[in-house]
Amino acid sequence: MDRRKFTKNVTKIISTGVLLSSNQLITGCSEDDEVLPDGTLQFTIPEDRDLIAGETFEITWKSVGIEKLDLAYKIDQAANFLTFERDYPANNLKYDFLVPNNINGLSLTFRVTNSETEEVLAEGNALQLIFKFLINLTETPELLLVGGALKVEEGVNNPFIVRKVGEEAFIALSRVCTHQGCVIDVNEDASFSCPCHGSEFTKDGEVTNGPAERALSSFKIEKEGNALTVFYF
């Protein structure tokens, strides 16, 4: 997956535990009047939504012959799932999940279980977590002038740098080397170099010297008045 893009691929899930690609599911479920077998649940992760900490993420499903669900998630590669909703009515057909702000991880995997039988009905692939970092420009002299830069390290699990590239334009780049994950240094000319294995990057994050082969991840930025919001992962 190209982490420079602010999108993600998802997998559709059915109760048999078989994972289907989006195209396969569309082919198999294209009719609105499709009748599902009794005891079946089809669980959908929306393709047009991002899993952003502090925001609501809607998950939906179709089900037949199931009354109540237990909803759970696990963080990254954890062995156990954390149940966040028990005995949830299956006929609601959706759940608005508020993504916690304090998750110490990079991804979530959702699972749906039949409350009565404890049968796992659906379990998806890991979805990338996106976090928000707020910057008040009136309190950030580093970003007053074009060319200015702010290093963000404390309180984030992915150190990054924000640079002002125009009167109203900013970019944010991860400072995690795409080779083996070392935190890279910022040079005087705004380029980057990795202290671990010598990879080098331009000020825009492009690779100029290996062993890294991929550019640095770039993060979406939204500006409203004197406030910047960086969406990092």
Image: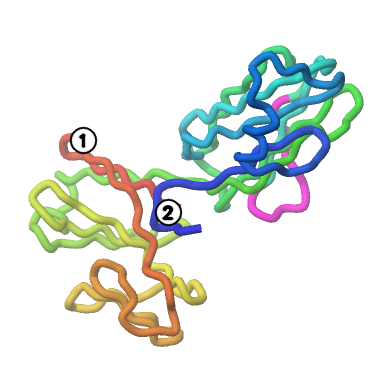
Decide whether residue 83 is among the magenta residues: yes
Decide whether residue 67 is among the magenta residues: no
Position of residue 32 relative to residue 8, above or below, is above
Task: Residue 182: give x, y in percent of width and height.
Answer: 46, 75
Location of residue 194 by image quarter: bottom left
Task: Residue 48: give x, y in percent of width and height.
Answer: 47, 34
Task: Residue 88: give x, y in percent of width and height.
Answer: 73, 18
- For label 2, the SS is loop
Residue linked to disc 1: 224
- Answer left or right for 207 relative to 7: left
**Which one is nearer the viewer's eye here, 14 or 3?**
14
**Residue at screen point 50% across, 47% down:** 8
**Which one is nearer the viewer's eye here, 3 or 230?**
3
**Residue at screen point 47% across, 39% down:** 50
**Which one is nearer the viewer's eye here, 216 or 186?**
216
**Residue at screen point 77% across, 23% down:** 69
**Residue at screen point 54% across, 48% down:** 128
Circle 2: residue type? Gly
| Boundaries of the magenta span | 75-85
Residue reaching furthest bottom? 198
- Answer left or right for 97 relative to 6: right
- Answer left or right for 143 relative to 205: left
- Cα–Cα span, label 1 and label 2: 22 Å
Q: Residues within 10 Å of mark 1 (few under 14, many from 20)?
A: few
Circle 1: residue type? Glu
Position of residue 31 relative to residue 187, above or below, is above
Task: Residue 116: give x, y in percent of width and height.
Answer: 89, 22
- For label 1, the SS is strand
Disc ID at residue 155: 2
The total of numbered circles placed on residues is: 2
